[in-house]
Amino acid sequence: MSVALVTGSAGLIGSEAARHFAGLGMHVVGLDNDMRKYFFGEDGSTAWSLVNLTSKLGDSYTHYDVDIRDRDVLKKIFERYGRDISLVIHTAAQPSHDWAAKEPFTDFDVNAVGTLNVLEYTRQHSPDAAFIFCSTNKVYGDTPNRLPLIEQETRYEIAEDHQFADGITEEMTIDNSMHSIFGVSKVAADVAVQEYGRYFGMKTASFRGGTLTGPAHSAAELHGFLAYLMRCVMEGRTYNLFGYKGKMVRDAIHSHDVLTAFEAFYRNPRSGEVYNLGGGRFSNTSHLEAFAVAEKIAGKEAKVNYVEQARMGDHQWYVSDMAKFQAHYPDWRMTYDVPAILNEIYEANADKWM
C-alpha cells in the first residue's frame, strides 16, 4: 500500500493532510510529539487533535510519538516503510517568530536541522517520494513592509498599478531584510528543500504559506491568527493587537484548500519548486475587518487591548500571488474566503469556547 508520511500530524495542516490522504486510500504514517504544548502551553496542545485523528482514521493511520530532531528513531521509521512511502508532507515546526527569540537553539534545531533530517532520510530510503514542505512567507523578511501602502478606513492597501497589486510573487527577494530568528530557520529549511530537488533530483516543493487556518487549529496567542481571534471573541478574552492601527492585512487560506493544492502537486510533482500559498485576492482581511466579521458571527463584542508598537518583523500588508502555482496546476481552485473560514471555526468550537 502507498504510504503518506506526515510530520506534525496532529497540527492544523498535518491533521488535515492525514485525513485527506487516508481518504484517498493511502496509509498515513504520522509523526508528532505535541511540541506545540511546550511552545505555547495548554492552549497550543494538539493532544485533542491526535485523539480525534486516531479514532476517526483507525487502521488507516499509524502514529509515532517522535521528535524530528531524533535521527536514530527517524531513520528506523524510514527504513521500515522505505519505498512504500510515495509522499512526505513535512509540517512539523516551531511556528512563532516571537517564541523563536526566546530559544534560538531550539527553533533552529527543529525548523532547520529537523527538516534536513527528514529530507536526508527521504533521499536515502524513499527517493521517488514527492516531498512537500510547509515553509512561510517570513522567508521574505520585512521586505513587504517597504511596499508603498495607502491607508484606508479599515486596512492598508497597495496601489492598483503596482507590480504586486495582485499579490506578492515568488520573485520578491529574501535578501537584505530582517527575518526574525524564526524566519532565519525557515529560510535555511526552505533552501535545503529546494536544493534536494535541484542537486539530487528529488520531487520537492516549498510552499511559502501566509495565514494557513481552519477549525483544527489549536488557537494560541503566539500562533493561529484567525482561530485565536475568533476564540477571544467567543470566550470574552482580551486580544492584544500590536501596531499598524489594526489595519495590517493578511491573506488566509483554509486547510482544505491547502490540501487540495498539495494533492495537485503530489499527482504531478516537480523538482525544487517554490510556491507562495495563501488566500490571495480571494481571501484576505485586516484585523479590524476580521473582528467585525467575528463579532457578527458570535453575537459578541470583541475585547481588544491595542499596543502601539508593532511586533518586530511583522508584515504590515501581505497578500500572496498564487499565479505561479495556478499556472502549473490550472485545475486547482480555492473554495473558502475569510467569512466562511471564521464561520466554520465558530461552528466547530462553539461547544468548547462559548
Image: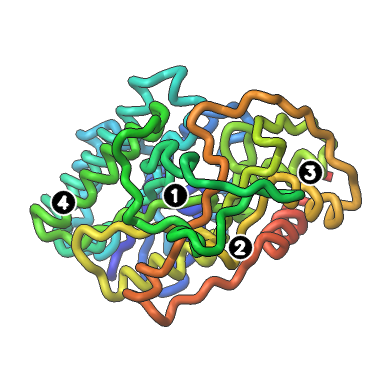
Given the image, on which type of amino acid does mark 2 rest?
Ser
Along the horizontal axis of the image, is 328 left or right of 209? left
Rounded to the nearest whole Å, what is the CA distance between mark 4 and mark 2? Answer: 32 Å
Rounded to the nearest whole Å, what is the CA distance between mark 1 and mark 3? Answer: 24 Å
Q: Are the residues flagged by discs 3 and 2 in contact, CB closer than 8 Å?
A: no
Say few, some or many: other residues with alpha carbon within 10 Å of mark 1 (under 14 / 14 to 19 / 20 or more).
many
Question: On the image, numbered disc 2 is attached to which residue?
Answer: 283
Q: Nearer the viewer, residue 298 or 9?
A: 298
The image quarter in which residue 237 lies: top right
Going from N to C along the chain, the mark reached first, 1 or 4, is: 1
Identify the residue shown where x is 57% and y is 37%: 223
Q: Position of residue 270 (x, y in %)?
A: 22, 67
The extreme top residue here reads 102
* Helix, strand or loop at mark 4: helix
Rounded to the nearest whole Å, what is the CA distance between mark 1 and mark 4? Answer: 23 Å
Going from N to C along the chain, the mark reached first, 1 or 3, is: 1
Identify the residue shown where x is 30% and y is 75%: 267
Question: On the image, numbered disc 1 is attached to which residue?
Answer: 9
Given the image, on which type of amino acid does mark 4 rest?
Tyr
Say few, some or many: other residues with alpha carbon within 10 Å of mark 2 (under 14 / 14 to 19 / 20 or more).
many
Q: Does the image show residue 58? A: no
Going from N to C along the chain, the mark reached first, 4 or 2, is: 4
Which disc is residue 196 wearing?
4
Going from N to C along the chain, the mark reached first, 2 or 1, is: 1
Say few, some or many: other residues with alpha carbon within 10 Å of mark 3 (under 14 / 14 to 19 / 20 or more).
some
Q: Nearer the viewer, residue 212 or 291?
A: 291
Q: Position of residue 196 (x, y in %)?
A: 15, 51
The mark closer to the camera, 2 or 1, is: 2
* Helix, strand or loop at mark 1: loop
